[in-house]
Amino acid sequence: MIEVLKPGLLMSIQDQGRFGFRHIGVSQSGAIDPFAAKMANTLLKNDIDDAVIEITLGLAKLLFKCDTVIALIGTDMQAQLDDKPVYPGWTYAVKQGQTLSFKTARNGFRAYVGVKGGVLCEPVMGSRSTDLAAGFGGTNGQALKQGDNIQIQPYYKDWPKRGGILPPKRNVIRVHSSIHADLLTEHALRSFCEISWCVKPQSNRMGVRLSNENSTLSHSHSLPSLAVNPGSIQLPPNGEPIVLLNDAQTTGGYPLLGTIINADLHHFAQLKPGDSIRFEYVDMSTAIKAQKKMTAHFAQLAIALNNAY
């Protein structure tokens, strides 16, 4: 068991997400950076979809009430196991009574703690992810708070020290073409890619809100609601795009500037207010190559870990 001593800005239990229910209005949820969660589980030889703890910004503290092994992945939050520094990308043996604490994130926004055997909460609709808006999954459907207990399976055996590197960050995010290209005009779509966009403080797990004082994308278009997914880039009338993330609604009535390719969407997990980002449109061939590169990255990690044991 793990006791939450300090949850920080936002701490929740997430896995790879909840799929197959968008037609009835159920959001995907899941880790904003599914590749980080996948790496944590790979380093621990867990199932890829095992639940992990997602920590936002830092300023959190966990008390371990049993022995286990953890994998810490994501941005550097100057973490310490008791008074010893621990670093993202590595596994660590944890003894009963030890505390894992986090300061403020340095160059990103989220970190993930995987535990050997995964977090043991009851699945809802096939997933342990916390749906914060609907109020189910995780621990009572809520963000973790001080005093909450996270159920895990104790692990007392030795575990080898293992590490892995996440794919590098990108400053230019690749985007599938817009289904509303004719409505928005080629000029508007070109303008979207010509300027840098700043992440607004109102961003959250539902979506990243962007702004640029030189934007000329304001409009008066009104559309019937259509299906949207994580990665859809909505354009409200004020001309400030919203990149939808895991907890976003399943339908929307704003025109779409396009959709983030799957290989790049995880970058939004580490964007904090004030960060800047640019976009470029790419074809399907480029998106497929990018996804194959991500798949190969994790295949190489799995081979390296298997040969190391």
Image (tube, helix red, strand yellow):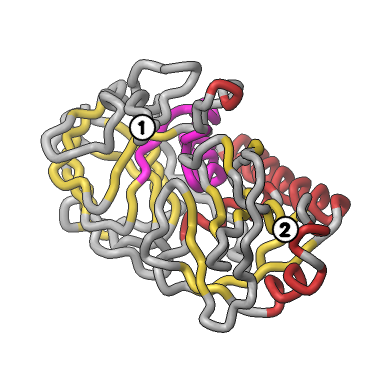
Distance of label 2 from label 1 (alpha carbons): 44 Å
* Residue 223: image location, x then y, percent: 66, 46
**Residue at the outermost bottom position:** 214
Q: Which residues are magenta?
A: 28-54
In front: label 2 or label 1: 2
The residue depicted at 71 percent of the width and 76 percent of the height is 191
User: Please, what is the three-letter code of the amino acid marked with disc 2?
Assistant: Val
In the rendered image, which residue does mark 2 sit on? 175
The residue depicted at 53 percent of the width and 77 percent of the height is 212
The residue depicted at 61 percent of the width and 40 percent of the height is 229
Q: Badge 1, how many Cα within 10 Å: few under 14, some, many 20+?
A: few
Q: Quadrant of residue 123?
A: top left
Q: Is residue 134 left or right of residue 166?
A: left
Residue 156 visible: no
- Residue 15: say if magenta: no
Tell me the SS state at disc 2: strand
User: Please, what is the three-letter code of the amino acid marked with disc 1?
Assistant: Asp
Tell me the SS state at disc 1: loop
In the rendered image, which residue does mark 1 sit on? 158
Q: As displayed, is residue 248 above or below residue 106?
A: above
* Quadrant of the drawing holding the N terminus: top left
Q: As displayed, is residue 235 above or below residue 32?
A: below
Q: Is residue 238 left or right of residue 11?
A: right
Disc 2 + disc 1, Cβ < 8 Å: no
Q: As displayed, is residue 12 above or below residue 77?
A: above
- Residue 43: say if magenta: yes
* Residue 176: image location, x then y, percent: 76, 54
* Residue 296: image location, x then y, percent: 73, 46
Q: Is residue 116 left or right of residue 156?
A: right
Q: Badge 2, how many Cα within 10 Å: few under 14, some, many 20+?
A: many
Q: Nearer the viewer, residue 175 or 295?
A: 175
